[in-house]
Amino acid sequence: MNGTYNITMQTPMGMEKGTITFTQDGDALSGSLNILRGSNAFSGGKIEANAFVFSGEIKKLITKIPYTAKGTIEGDHLTAVADTKYGKLAIEGNRAL
């Protein structure tokens, strides 16, 4: 699951483009979510087969948006949903070349 994925996220402000970088160590997952013109590190995530879950905060100016993301990777395609106080945000993407 290691690697970077180019993603789109449906937000209340419209479609946003960014990247997710995963670092896997056994079934532990860490990395960074780079979206809304910011880089937001996460750790403490878990991997089971092709499914993942991780939590963190998206920092935008003075706002912090906590989230929990759950998803799967099939081949080079990532599909996930981030659960936030603004609702569920759909995430899709593909492994960066």
Image: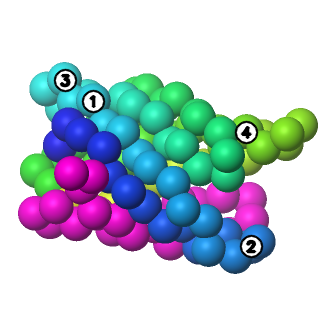
Q: Is residue 61 visible?
A: yes
- SS label for mark 2: loop
* Res. 88 image quadrant: bottom right
Residue extent of the magenta highlight: 74-97
Alpha-carbon distance for marks 4 and 2? Answer: 15 Å
Percent from the top left, x then y, of residue 84?
Answer: 66, 58
According to the picture, the residue beneath numbered tag 3 turns out to be: 25
Residue 15 x/y as whole percent:
62, 74
Give the position of the N terminus as an image quadrant.
top left
Q: Is residue 14 above or below residue 47?
A: below
Secondary element at tag 4: strand
Q: Nearer the viewer, mark 2 or mark 3?
A: 2
- Give yes or no for residue 95 being in the magenta stretch: yes
Q: Residue at x 46, y 35 (%)?
A: 32
**Residue 87: percent from left, percent from top:** 68, 69
Q: CA distance from mark 3 to mark 4?
A: 26 Å
N-terminal of the two: label 4 or label 2? Answer: 2
State yes or no: discs 1 and 2 in contact (Cβ < 8 Å): no
Looking at numbered disc 3 in the image, what kind of residue is underneath it? Answer: Asp
Q: Amino acid at mark 2?
A: Pro
Please tell me the numbered disc located at residue 23. 1
The disc placed on residue 59 is: 4
Real-space Cα separation, disc 1 to disc 2, in angstroms: 28 Å
Marks 2/3 in contact by CB < 8 Å: the verdict is: no
Pointers 4 and 2 in contact (CB under 8 A)?
Answer: no
Question: Residue at left 10%, top 63%?
Answer: 75
